[in-house]
Every structure is written in structure tokens, then in C-alpha cells.
Amino acid sequence: MKFPIAAFLVLSACLALASPPPAIAAPGLQVKETGETITISRGATPVLTYHKAEVDPPAEADPIFRRSGFIHPLHAPSGGVVTGIHPDDHYHHLGLWHAWVKTEYDGHEPDFWNLKARTGRVRFAGDSVHGDNDFGVRQEQVAYLDGPDAEPTLILNEELRVTADFVDGANVIDYELEQTNVTEKPLVLPAYRYGGGIAYRAPLGWTKDNSDYLTSEGLDRTNSHATRARWVAMFGPAENADGESADQLATVAILCHPTNHDAPQRIRTWDNGKVFFNYVPVQETGWKIAPGETVTLRYRIIIFDGKADDDAIEARWKVYAE
């Protein structure tokens, strides 16, 4: 059962007083929280790390690319890393994350994705709670309506809930996002080729020679962009902690829940050999979030060791959809 963060805080406090604690966690999964990160692991094997504190970009990059509120690294079941961060072609790409790009708000056009524009950003907002295999955090999408040096305006208050499991040999991550427009004006989301939803950047060593995409419609990197898909899988060599190839293939499949806006959503993929992915709720038709309105987006990430076939992923999607 899913809870908003506020309700989850109350529930967690009540459970903490119970003795003995109820067995509600997936076997073998643990959550550890520090002032900077929240990590989920399965025994000694890491599953994912969420960043509460801002992470610095490489020394050669503009400090504007410092950001919090994202997941990296994300791991395959055997422990290999399957996300990349701060590539020199897009310093704002951050493993697993989300943000709106093309927007209209009260005569402004804040861009919460492209940090270099200095008109908006997503950030961890200081509230978090966790169980034994899940955590909830509050995030914000803020706009710099009076310039990058002025205090930003909070537009969207977000509750992000991440739940991990280990099912039939695969890491299963549920990524559930609630966004509430806390202002008195609508946030307009014109149709645009990317943004919103969920975004993924693969390890930076994935190329046209060692990786590819596979969609639920049987498409790959050459023909999948701007199509609709129930799920999209990306595969390539996992990396070890220092960024070197671990010489073992891994598959990252991202599933779009059928209740999402405009589901099955259109997708953003690249045909240049690098692997970037984005489910885009507004790629075909614009949308808006009215004052006081809350919208929910749900995705599931399933990570396999090796190259998973379409039948295995489709079976997992049917379970998720039901």
C-alpha cells in the first residue's frame, strides 16, 4: 500500500513504538540514511543511492550544475553500476531523475531541467522518511522569476516515494511522484520533445557497439524516438565503482503505469550511440497543472543481470499494470 509522505511519517512513528516490529520489509533489503544520502542495499550488495545533499559537477563544469534530488548510482542485481552522471555532453544528466523543461508561468518560461538556463531547478526540500525497503522525500521545483540571484519561487511541491524489492533475480524499483501546484496560477506545460516523467542516463561507456534500446513495440535506437511504449529496456555493460566496465551485461527496463497521464507515454531516445531515455507526458499534447492541483506519475524500473528478452519484460509489465 502506498502512502503520502505526511501519512507515512505518522505511520512510521506508530510502528516505531510497536514491539516487536512488524515484518513489512522485503527480505534482505535495508535502508540507510545519512545527512547526505539515502541508500538501499540487499545485504552487502548495493541497490541505489538517492542524494539529499547537492552533488558537485566535475571541476571543469559550471558550478550551476550542482544539484540534489536524484538517484545515482543505480545497480544491477550483481552490484554493477547501470547509471551515469555529469557527462560532458549534458552535465545536467543525473542518473535517474525528473524535471519539467518547457513551461509557462505568469508571463515567465521557467526551465527546471536545463540548469544552465538559470530559470529553475529541482531540489531536495529537507523532509524524508524511510522504512526497511522504501523511502519518501519532499522535493521542490522552484523558478527564478526575478533572476538567478533572487530568492526562487516554489511552484511545485513534490512527494517522491521510492520502493525497492528483489523479485525472481531482478532489482525492482517503484518510482512514484506526486506534484502539487502550490501557487495561485497554473503551470502550463506546452507540448515538447522531452521533460517531465522520468529520465535515465546510462553509464557513459555505453556506445552503439555495446548497447541498445528495445521497446514494447519491438523498436530500437534507430526508430524508437517519439513512439509510444508500455516499457523501454536499455542494455549494455555494467560498470564497477570506478567507472570501468565490469564486462557483464545488464538490462534496465522502465515501465510506464497505465494510469499515468497520456499513457502509454511517448518516449525520448537517442540514435547517436549514447543511451539517454525519457518518458514524456507532453511530447504530443500540452498539459497544465492548475493551482492547488496534484498530479501523480508512476514508473517501475526493473534491472536484470544479462540481456533480458521481451517476453520476460512484458510479463513483468502485466504484473505491474494489474
Image: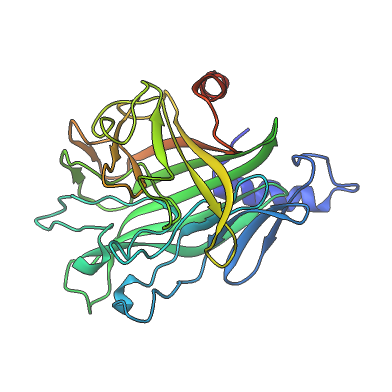
In this view, the residue farthest toward the front is 209
Image x and y of residue 205, in percent: 43, 56
Q: Residue visible at 41% across and 59% down?
A: 94
Locate residue 186: give its quadrant: top left
**In the rendered view of the protein, which quadrant contains the N terminus?**
top right
Residue shown at 63%/43% (left/top)?
Answer: 164
Closer to us: 100 or 46 = 46
Task: Give the answer, above or below, for where 304 lies relative to 315.
Answer: below
Q: Quadrant of the C terminus?
A: top right
| Farthest right residue in view | 20
- Of residues 106 and 147, the one drawn nearer to the viewer in this rendering: 147
> Where, by quadrant of the figure, is residue 218 drawn?
top left
What colouring does the structure picture have? rainbow
When the figure is inspected, residue 218 is found, relative to residue 73, above or below; the finding is above
Q: Nearer the viewer, residue 81 or 316?
A: 81
Residue 203 x, y percent position in the rendering: 45, 55
Q: Is residue 272 above or below residue 279?
A: below
Horizontal and vertical percent position of residue 117: 19, 66
Say which of 315 and 119 sits in front: 315
Give left or right: position of 155 versus 317.
left
Q: Is residue 253 left or right of residue 319?
A: left
Judge from the rendering whether residue 221 lies leftward or rightward of residue 193; answer left or right: right
Q: Residue at x 36, y 20 (%)?
A: 217
Residue 72 lies, in percent from the top left, at 51, 58
Total number of numbered labels? 0
Query: What residue occupies the far left of the structure in this picture?
Result: 107
